[in-house]
């Protein structure tokens, strides 16, 4: 028996209405300029994202180190090499984790983390999450993770004098031949192309330029910024700077209807996310 296009679309639309709450990210824009009152755990500037969960820990096992780890809003262009991801007012998000001027003893560590969910749920097909991070020196570890229901599906790590993408389906590995530039800015784009996969693009600007890309498996719904165990502060050159978070475009109703026709069972299995 033939099924008309009208009845297919009607069935898809009915399914969409029954499951639409919580399965698509809302359009999102946020930057450091929105945080005049300070960037702390629980703050939530801009639109389209959940509140920040921010933490910092220091472990002074040796008893001899003076360790520092925290976050702040500040000027990313003031560091050596003029790494710059600022918005109005010369502001960017920043994380640091270092031992001051004394160095680490055995078993010592300093960590700073900032997590955030996408409001409304995971990305829907056609949506792209993007941000910028600015880095200078490459000691310790600093970077960004993207998660799908708690699984890490993309990581860009700057450390051990390298720039490395991890956990992706294709093209994980070292970026841009690990060539160093003190004013490196990475623009990261995570585009959801299906309900269970997407593409990543890292565009480098500053003293050196380049583009790398690949695919990931999952449905992006959360990101994590981190800065761990760097050398001493040296005028902020070991910090991680980040800014300009976006989720675009607004989910298309017709695209979601068409996607629901062929993947209804996947939609029904998805739970509402933070």
Image (cartoon, rainbow, N blue to C red):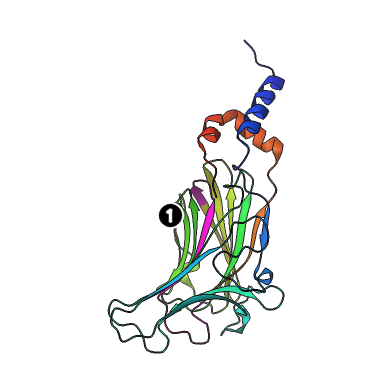
Image point (51%, 50%), residue name: 215
Q: Quadrant of residue 117?
A: bottom right
Q: Is residue 19 above or below residue 200?
A: above
Q: Please provide percent x and percent y for residue 246.
A: 65, 58
**Residue found farthest to the top:** 1
Q: Is residue 5 left or right of residue 239?
A: right
Q: Please provide percent x and percent y for residue 164.
A: 45, 64
Q: Please provide percent x and percent y for residue 54.
A: 51, 67
Q: Please provide percent x and percent y for residue 78.
A: 61, 84
Q: How many marks?
A: 1
Q: Is residue 189 left or right of residue 226?
A: right
Q: Is residue 87 above or below residue 260?
A: below
Question: Which residue in the protein does label 1 denote?
Answer: 167
Label 1 residue SS = loop
Specify whether residue 199 is in view: yes
User: Is residue 268 shown in magenta?
Assistant: no
Q: Which residues are magenta?
A: 215-239
Image point (43%, 54%), residue name: 167
Q: Quadrant of residue 185?
A: bottom right
């Amino acid at each position: 028996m033939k099924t008309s296009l009208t009845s297919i679309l009607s069935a898809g639309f009915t399914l969409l209405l029954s499951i639409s709450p919580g399965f698509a990210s809302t359009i999102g824009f946020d930057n450091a300029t929105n945080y005049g009152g300070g960037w702390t755990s629980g703050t939530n500037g801009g639109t389209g994202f959940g509140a920040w969960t921010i933490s910092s820990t220091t472990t002074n096992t040796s008893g001899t180190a003076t360790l520092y780890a925290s976050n702040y809003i500040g000027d990313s262009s003031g560091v050596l090499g003029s790494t710059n991801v600022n918005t109005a007012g010369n502001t960017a998000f920043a994380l640091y984790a270092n031992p001051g001027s004394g160095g680490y003893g055995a078993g010592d560590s300093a960590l700073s983390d900032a997590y955030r969910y996408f409001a409304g749920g995971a990305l829907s097909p056609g949506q792209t999450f993007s941000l910028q991070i600015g880095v200078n020196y490459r000691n310790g570890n600093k970077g960004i993770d993207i998660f799908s229901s708690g699984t890490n599906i993309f990581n860009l790590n700057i450390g051990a004098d390298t720039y490395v993408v991890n956990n992706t389906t294709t093209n994980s590995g070292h970026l841009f031949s690990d060539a160093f530039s003190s004013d490196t800015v990475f623009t990261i784009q995570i585009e959801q192309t299906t309900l269970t996969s997407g593409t990543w693009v890292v565009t480098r600007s500053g003293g050196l330029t380049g583009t790398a890309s690949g695919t990931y498996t999952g449905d992006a719904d959360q990101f994590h910024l981190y800065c761990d165990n760097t050398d001493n502060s040296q005028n902020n050159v070991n910090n991680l700077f980040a800014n300009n978070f976006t989720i675009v475009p607004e989910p298309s109703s017709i695209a979601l209807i068409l996607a629901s026709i062929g993947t209804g069972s996947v939609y029904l299995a998805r739970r509402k996310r933070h």
